Amino acid sequence: MRVRLSLGQVVAAVLCLGVFGGDRAVGQAEPEPKAVPRLQVVPQPYAQASFERDGAEIARYHFGAGLERPFLYPIVGPSGRSLTRMGHPHDPESHSHHNSVWISHVDVGGVDFWSDKRLGIVRHKRIVEYADEGETSAIVAENEWVAADGAVLLAETRRMTVALLDSDEWLLVLDLTLNANAKAVTLGKTPFGMIGVRMAKTLGVHDGGGRIRNSESGINEKEVLWKQARWVDYSGAIADGVLEGVTLFDHPDNPNHPSYFHVRNDGWMGASLTFDGPRQIEPNVPLHLRYGLYIHAGMKPPAEIEACWKRFVQMPPVR
């Protein structure tokens, strides 16, 4: 069977084949694409931004206007499952403030920023920067700590840096700079603040048979609660036969290092900045804090955790 084509069809076919030059002139070299970084910050709808490794999300920062405070969720382990959760597994209403990984304090100049009572909120102000540097990426944000009467008690700059490690493990570094605005602000004596981590249910000691360990060889709530340490690790089963965990690092430059740690067998840990007494932030004398989260496979031997803590300590300071 003979097929007849119109002149227009012939011209269209020739153009598609690039005979008349197409998008590239004769002899022009193919473009040289730049290397695609393994790790990137990817802005998302509704005031969110993701850290993505090889195109897959490993953490997400939430900073919407209706939130009591910004937070990070999920925190994805090497197996691809989140090692943190939103809320207490057995008391979701009164512990609604347990938002995976968050920064807050129960007594900032007498105002409660810890609970979800809208007495004080950590209000997102702006994103300063999204930075991608190959094996590290960062989100830099500015926040305001606002009392119920509208008074801004603290201005905060928060830098969240993700650094890739071997075997799909990674490190999250949180650099906080807190400035008092018009007058000095006292952070009251309390175990609640500055950083909290709510673990996935199956990692909890009670619910999943997980384990809490610290740098001083303490095990579980009885031996770790209110004890000083360089780090606390919470590890357990995230799937059948799969153990993973998160280690919370305190930095030697923090004012109460080694920190007292607040932990519970129900799947919670935090570093307590003012457990041993109040701390005052003077105007124009900012408080700098650095914490780290080591996201890892297995029930890591303490020596391996200590080695990662030392790597965290040696990272250059950010101001």
Image (cartoon, rainbow, N blue to C red):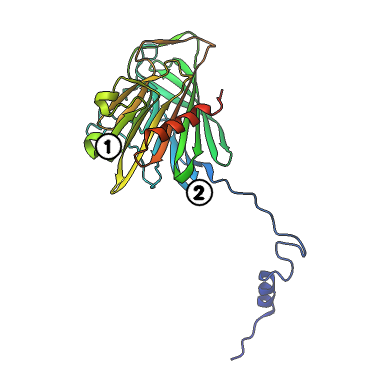
Per the image, label 2 sits on a secondary structure element best described as loop
Which residue in the rendered view is the most extreme toward the right? Answer: 27
Q: Tell me if I can see residue 97 in this picture.
A: no
Residue bearing mark 2: 54
Q: Position of residue 263 (x, y in %)?
A: 30, 26
Mark 1 and mark 2: Cα distance apart in space:
29 Å
Which residue in the rendered view is the most extreme toward the bottom? Answer: 1
Which residue in the rendered view is the most extreme toward the front? Answer: 303
Q: Position of residue 232 (x, y in %)?
A: 36, 28
Q: Is 182 in front, or is 309?
A: 309
Say whether disc 1 or disc 2 marks the residue closer to the N-terminus.
2
Q: Alpha-carbon neighbours of circle 2 within 10 Å: few (<14), some, or many (≥20)?
A: few
* Above or below for 1 versus 117: below
**Quarter of the image that includes the N terminus:** bottom right
Q: Tell me if I can see residue 93 in this picture.
A: yes
The residue under the point 37% across, 15% down is 274
Classify residue 67 by image quadrant. top left
**Quarter of the image that includes the C terminus:** top right
Q: Position of residue 203 (x, y in %)?
A: 29, 38
Classify residue 248 by image quadrant. top left
The residue under the point 65% across, 76% down is 9
Q: How many marks?
A: 2
Which dot, 1 or 2, sits closer to the camera?
1
Type of amino acid under label 2: Asp
Q: Position of residue 200 (x, y in %)?
A: 31, 38
Residue bearing mark 1: 210
Mark on residue 227? Answer: none
Type of amino acid under label 1: Gly
The residue under the point 33% across, 15% down is 190
Q: Is 192 in front, or is 125?
A: 192
Per the image, label 1 sits on a secondary structure element best described as loop
